[in-house]
Image (tube, rainbow, N blue to C red):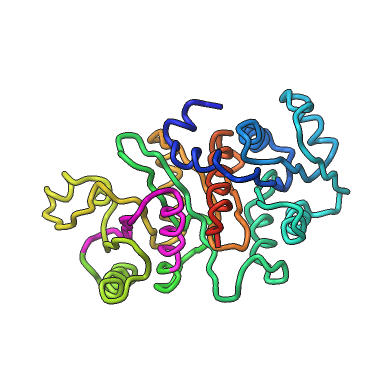
Amino acid sequence: MSEVYAKEFDGIVAKAKAVKKPMRVALAGADVENMLLGLFDAAADGFVEPILIGNGDRITALLDKLGLKDRKYKLQALDGDANPVQYAIEMCTAGKADCLMRGNTQTRDFLMPVLNKANHLIKPDALVTHVVFLKVPDYDRLLAVSDVTLLINPSIEGRKEVAVNMVRALKVFGVEKPNIALLSLVEKPSFQMRDTVEDQTLVRDHARRPIADCNLAGPIAYDLIMSKEAARLKGYDCPWCGEFDGIVVPNLMSGNLLVKVLQRNAGATGCGILVGAAIPIAICSRSDESEQAYLSLAACAAMWDSGKYF
């Protein structure tokens, strides 16, 4: 296992390695190199059991190429017309797998079956959110960002649920009372920017009746979230600047862009999971490194073992 895994995500990895039994992972569309490498690294560390679903010939050829063919795994080879995501979900709902993992599938093709009410992964009143956990260079803690895949332009109630899901995950990972920032362009509410007014409302409502066991601030710009010195220079009075554990973004574009810029241009390492479904779900980009797949599985295993992924 890469030293980066333990060094930057040691708390999550330690919790994953301490699971009572290995988590059975259904990799939907398993003919994808980086996901296989991350999955088998996790298996080598004892917290997952791989179930490979998809085109049998392509999967077997790739395992042979990667030197993984003799490792322990289950292979579910499907006919050409079979949907590997739907098959993986049915394995999970039948109790034959514990965790769903995205493989060689388009994001839309993966998420549509997950969100399909007929598959019973989502309760009617629940909101599933994609939370990315990042280790940003020169920032002294892991940083959660959400939602960066599912919610295009969430309502005020939607962003409240995003914050609740984020806090749930952070607490499993050992953050006792997370500091959560509501990201915006400016710090003062403006009726020309709906999110700023809604952020102020969320913070005021949270002060009267907490939405979760967390500290909540917003609207707040990115530089103030990440730096106490920036807050001092701007005269922004908030005790958690430079110490935020999570960022709730106003829309999908800003969240997706923030995560990709931090990963591609600022050297951030990260992993992503879906929080709020009836099973743990690991979701990474097919262009991510294998370590991100490993870390997503570690996060899922920690949530799964705690029983708090829903």
Residue at the extreme front of the image, as rendered: 20
Look at the image and tell me in which quarter the N terminus lies: top right
The image shows residue 268, relative to residue 168, as above or below, that is above
Q: Quadrant of residue 18?
A: top right
Q: Is residue 154 left or right of residue 184?
A: right
Residue 192 seen in this snapshot = no
The image shows residue 211, relative to residue 252, as above or below, that is below
Q: Which residues are magenta?
A: 161-187
Q: Residue at x 60, y 72 (%)?
A: 123
Q: Is residue 149 left or right of residue 243?
A: right
Q: Which of 10 and 283 lies nearest the eye of the viewer? A: 10
* Percent position of residue 162, x then y: 44, 63
Q: Which of 77 and 11 lies nearest the eye of the viewer? A: 11
Q: Residue at x 64, y 44 (%)?
A: 21
Q: Is residue 60 left or right of residue 300?
A: right
| Residue 175 is inside the magenta segment | yes
Q: Residue at x 27, y 76 (%)?
A: 208
Q: Quadrant of residue 266?
A: top left
